[in-house]
Amino acid sequence: MTNAEWFLLVGTLLLVMGLTFTLLKRTPITAAIIYLLVGLICGPSGLNLYHFNPLKDSALLETLTEVVVLISLFSAGVKMPGPFSLARWRTPILLATVSMTITVGLIAALAYFVLGLPLGAGVLLGAILAPTDPVLATDVQIRHPGDRDQLRFTLTCEAGMNDGSAFPFVMLGLGLLGLHDLGDYGVQWFLVDVLWATGASIAIGVVAGVALARLGWKLRRAPHQHELLDDFLGLGLIGVVYGITVLAHAWGFLAVFFAAVALRQTERKLTLSSHEHTDNHPPTGIDEGQVPTVSAGSLVFKEHLERLSELTLVLMLGGTLFINSWSWEAVGLALFVFLVARPVSVLVGLWGTGTARPMRLLTGWFGVRGIGSLYYLMYAIEHGLPEALSLKLIQLTIIVVTLSIFLHGTSVKPLLDRFWPPRKPAQP
């Protein structure tokens, strides 16, 4: 396809989506399904107007998916409702740690014993497919900073954290394949890739988010009264935090998410304390939207970028699939991830927490796989994964992501309407 033809295709798709937005919200399908169908029709599975080779263009795809995930993680972080409490965050933390580990282990076992992959490749495949996606799961995520729905909060928070908590398993898989130094008995991997990288990521993100929130708050108030470019500040926070964290050999995804959370929570505290100070009464019922903040000002722009990025990458995904890309082992792997690994890991991870049964079941099903999985796959390829193994993992991963878009995309709205209807606003 020429540049003009690409402009025509993407522009037409944007116009159709923009004009039919209300109709689309009433249908039981998500926007990602439409993008994927267009990609399948125009790609090598259909008209063969274009073809995208993930192995040949792995560096480009790694950069694109990296940027998209970062934007999505920031958007997820600034929508976290306040105030922050460990009791509220307990469930997503368990999902991003205990359930993540169980999922990686189950997928690795299937890959090793059933698919015949080397142990390192099995662990790597588990790490690639274990994280839930913050980009394609918008229909089950928090819609705005005031959304206090517990299921949406749990899924959004889990996706924000497990895109970073999967990284140690990626490095473990690469290490078992001889592509990363694990140290004697894995000591270096545990100390550096697990303890240091995780702790440093959270610390860098929190410090940066708090600092920007306080600086922006101070500059907006007297005597400075500056006007701030919130979009630039949001993008700048993402870039600085991610750059510092990677240079510190820590996990940038985790740092950006916690930077966004810290930014939002700090601005919320400053807003409420300001009202309490000026009005001399507890700040109940305060509309935080009345006070300009970096988090609120940059959120709309980030969500637009996220939607455009989703369209682009899902179109590219459709352009990678041939008819012969489908195999029984790839489909079987996808069904194992959706019907066994994810539900079992959620049930075990939330054992004894008192979580309501409908929430456990819905959380176990809505483990959307997407752009994050593609990033980890491209990351592994760029770090020296052998070509034959790369092609195998590409085929398996793309089929799992494709089926996730279709299965989760067609079930999310009916299941939520049936088992988790939106809460009615409280009566005054």
Image (spheres, grey):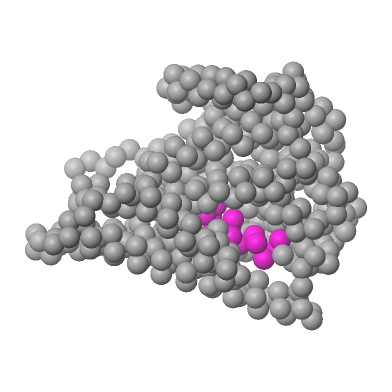
Q: Is residue 106 visible?
A: no
Magenta extent? 156-170
User: Residue 290, relative to residue 242: is it above or below?
Assistant: above
Given residues 235 and 143, the one toward you in this image is 235
Q: Nearer the viewer, residue 239 or 330?
A: 239
Quadrant, the N terminus: top right
Q: Is residue 172 on the magenta stretch?
A: no
Q: What is the x, y in percent for residue 199?
A: 54, 73
Question: How many marks can you see?
Answer: 0
* Lateral position of residue 96 relative to residue 90, left or right: right
Residue 188, compared with residue 319, is above or below; it is below
Say which quadrant the C terminus sits in: top left
Q: Residue furthest front?
A: 3
Residue 370 lies left or right of residue 239; in this view the side is right
Of residue 1 and residue 379, the one placed in the foreground of this image is: 1
Residue occupying image coordinates x 54% and y 26%: 28
Which residue is rendered at x = 60% and y = 28% of the image?
A: 35
For residue 3, above or below residue 240: above
Residues 241 and 350: in front is 241
Q: Can residue 251 be seen here? A: yes
Q: Residue at x 63, y 43 (%)?
A: 370
Residue 201 location (% of width, % of height): 53, 68
The picture quadrant where one finds residue 279 is bottom left
Image coordinates for residue 10, horizontal then vertical, percent: 56, 25
Q: Residue at x 74, y 66 (%)?
A: 172
Q: Main secondary structure of the magenta part?
A: helix
